[in-house]
Amino acid sequence: MDRLSPRGATRASAREPAFAAELRAAVRGEVRERESLARYSTYRIGGPATVLLPAAAEDVAVALRLAAAAGVPWFAVGLGSNILLPDEGLDALVVRVGKGLDALVPDGGRWSIGAGLPAPHAARRTAEQGFAGLHIFVGVPGTVGGGVYMNAGCHGSDWSEVVESVTTVDGSGNDRTWSRAEIPFTYRRSGLSGQLVLGTVVRLRAEDPAKITAELGEMYRWRRDGTPFNQPCCGSVFKNPGGPSWKQTEGPRTAGQLIEAVGLKGARVGAAEVSPVHANYFINTGGATAADVRGLIERAQREVEARFGARLEPEVKLIGRWGEYLNPEAPNG
Ligand SMILES: Cc1cc2nc3c(=O)[nH]c(=O)nc-3n(C[C@H](O)[C@H](O)[C@H](O)COP(=O)(O)OP(=O)(O)OC[C@H]3O[C@@H](n4cnc5c(N)ncnc54)[C@H](O)[C@@H]3O)c2cc1C
């Protein structure tokens, strides 16, 4: 069924059985209909959608071409560790980048890595071989593709510091390799909107494997002990406030400190809870909906703004049913 998009063009839904059948016939990978997206997000939240699990890069190009021809929007998902997917599911075609696109090939200090490899695996495997640079991502539970797309970072570094090139495919199914200089990386943004990341080549530093793995172990423990690491969540819910509209220099400053200061640690809306461990992490305690998490987001925004005059902006990407970003100011929204 065609629907009118906000721009007036018609969009078709990937949920149409005819679209799924055509896609299934065209790819080697798997096409799953009415698949619960909760399986593909670390929040364990999200309604049904048509999901493609590509077997190789060609499947992605074929699928995006088919989707374009049918007027079906698409949405890339890695490990779903930075997104809140809608309870009603998605009408966009979900391309889940994982196995099949997860090769790791070393060539001296240059490593070619598929977008579907979990970043913590890339961190451990490169560190074991005596290469530093990716080891910092041991506690960032996303894929390499999601990390590059988001320019994820921690411990004072980010993907832009190691990337040499990135290979993508666009909505017309055309692939392209971008050199580092061509990618407009900024804080938590790659500027690669409209592109699906297939893989990257990174340049790493050779170091003593024992030293790197010791550092990696320390970083992992820091994560494990300071955040609700193994519970269903999406990392930091809000960006830290800043900018000219908010100049507080004393008292609570970070998003987590502000939420804690208004007494919301442990607060709940439905089954979504402000983590008692770290107030900028919201947890799905079991059966939470996207509406619960959004309710908790709004409550924290309201109470922090009323007391401190600071407007908290979500860092997590809130996704609409066509795969659109409901908070386009979020990184790479
Ligand atoms: C416990 C925890 C700790 C975290 N700590 C950090 C941290 O320290 N630093 C940090 O930066 N982030 C952190 N995050 C957030 C998150 O892990 C990162 O942003 C991660 O890089 C997202 O990768 P993903 O594969 O899960 O992406 P997803 O959540 O699946 O997607 C995020 C965005 O990237 C897009 N995307 C995903 N894959 C691709 C692709 N192959 N091509 C194009 N677009 C793609 C999606 O469409 C979406 O817009 C944390 C999350 C959790 C749960």
Image (cartoon, rainbow, N blue to C red):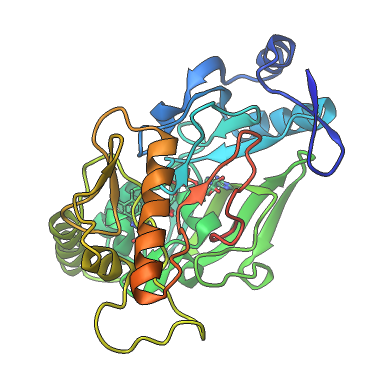
Q: Residue at x 38, y 38 (%)?
A: 292
327 relative to 14, above or below:
below
The quadrant of the image that shows the N terminus is top right
Q: Residue at x 41, y 60 (%)?
A: 301
* Front-lying residue, 129 or 37: 37
Instruction: Residue 118: tell me if it is visible.
Output: no
The percent position of residue 287, horizontal first and vertical second, equals 31, 27
Whole-percent x, y for residue 135 in the image: 30, 61
x, y (%) of residue 180?
A: 61, 69
The answer to which image quadrant residue 108 occupies is bottom left
Determine which quarter of the picture holds residue 75.
top right
The count of marks equals 0
Q: Is residue 332 left or right of residue 25?
A: left
Expressed as whole percent of the image width and height from the top left, the position of residue 77 reads: 52, 39
- In the rendered structure, the answer to whether residue 192 lies left or right of residue 233 reads right
Q: Is residue 298 above or below residue 45?
A: below
- Foreground of the two, 323 or 57: 323
Left or right placement of residue 296 versus residue 17 in this view: left
Is residue 3 at least partly visible in the picture? yes
* 331 and 286: which is toward the camera: 286
In which quadrant of the rendered image does the C terminus lie? bottom right
The residue positioned 16% from the left and 60% from the top of the image is: 226
